[in-house]
Image (cartoon, rainbow, N blue to C red):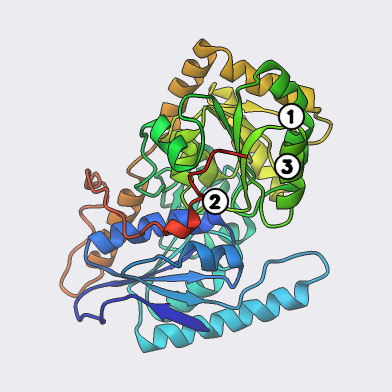
Amino acid sequence: MSSRSNLRAARPGHPLVAIACGGTGGHLFPGVAVAEQLLLRDCDVTLLISPKEVDQQAVRNAIGMEIATLPAVGMTRGQLGAFFAGFWKSYRTARELFARRPPQAVLAMGGFTSAPPVLAGRAAGAATFLHESNTIPGKANRWLAHGVTQAFVGFPSTAGRLHHTNILRTGTPVRPQFERGDASAARVALGAHPTRPLLLVTGGSQGASGVNDLVLRALPALLQRAPELQFIHLTGPTDVEKVRAGYHLHQARAVVRPFLTEMELALNAATVAVSRAGGSSLAELAALRLPSVLIPYPTAADNHQFHNASAFAESGAALIVEQHGASGEQLAAAVLGLIANPAAHAAMASALERWDMPHAAELIAERILALVESRLPGRGPLATLDAPPKTGVRASSFQHAPSDLPSSQPLA
């Protein structure tokens, strides 16, 4: 296990909460949001992440919490041996970590890093929790649900798909910096023109070649009908040069990056987004009221991204273009229908409000602490489980790294 820490020294009487949230940004960033709320409530926090580069980069500016890397690997076809070996090593690593200082609670945010710490936490006597951000629960959470103390869900339909009697819909936590701000200022910070419409393209924290290719096919139609359109395109690590070449070929104004830490800037800068449909991405779109065209990842487990996207689309909060069989013209028409039609844009922004649950992280932190306190010697039954979360707590324990921002030069 590798571990680093900006953590204050362990303090007797202050609860420790371990949060297993590695693997993708969709698991990690909601976990960070909960961690920040726990820090504000005078807890100590350990984040348990994977060795993947997206995890390591995303937490490098964590302040006030311990970061521990578990040797977990995802389950892929033909690699079951590696998965189970990683599972066992992660469990032993978590047991060793918890032996040095037992946590009072362990929260799993889903994904392949989540199960070993929950099992290790149960063995150490901790209360255990999980959060599921998607409509269709992942395999790890379906398995863990039988034994955790409480489950939290992002979508109302998810509760019926988890076998647990104590489920609360909290929404999916979003980091506090994801608040609506000045679009012109955000564009200038990213090197874009302050008043021209901007399309944000993102395939999630690891990018998406299917999204990248479809947007490149849509470019001629987009630029023909909206010649002032500019782009922020987050490609993931493999397609950066190909996508840059595509924009250069069409002489489009674009910033092309593999990954952007300051996603709140990109979302505030955008007029419309083209995005995958993971639960965390949708929560961020709702928080910023950003209309979007969703391209669900077609091979996601149990097709959960399509079900996520459908829930948004049925409420008028997004449009869907399915990756398989879609043409660039279809995508361009969907995007331009939102950019060129202010009434449609405004209606979608309004529909997103119902999906925004800005106090999700606070509510989860409050529930965890209430249950931890109820287990202390001399305490009676949990009496505050239905109390509303504290509001107005918006401070962030993450600091922006200037090196993560593109230069403020005009888009090339």
Q: Nearer the viewer, mark 2 or mark 3?
A: 3
- For badge 1, the amino acid type reads Leu
- For badge 3, the amino acid type reads Asn
* Residue 298 in view (yes/no): no
Q: Which mark is residue 212?
A: 3
Q: Which mark is residue 162?
A: 2
- For badge 2, the amino acid type reads Leu
Q: Earlier in the sequence, mark 3 or mark 1?
A: 3
- At horizontal 21% and vertical 80% (from top left) the residue drawn is 11
Q: Earlier in the sequence, mark 2 or mark 3?
A: 2
Q: Which residue is mark 1?
A: 219
Name the spot of residue 268 as percent of width and height, x first: 44, 35
In the image: residue 102, left or right of residue 276: left
Within-10-Å neighbours for mark 3: few <14, some 14–19, many 20+: many
Classify mark 2: helix, strand or loop: loop
**In the picture shown, does residue 328 fall above or below 60?**
above
In the image: residue 212, left or right of residue 91: right
Q: Nearer the viewer, mark 1 or mark 2?
A: 1
Q: Earlier in the sequence, mark 1 or mark 2?
A: 2
Classify mark 1: helix, strand or loop: helix
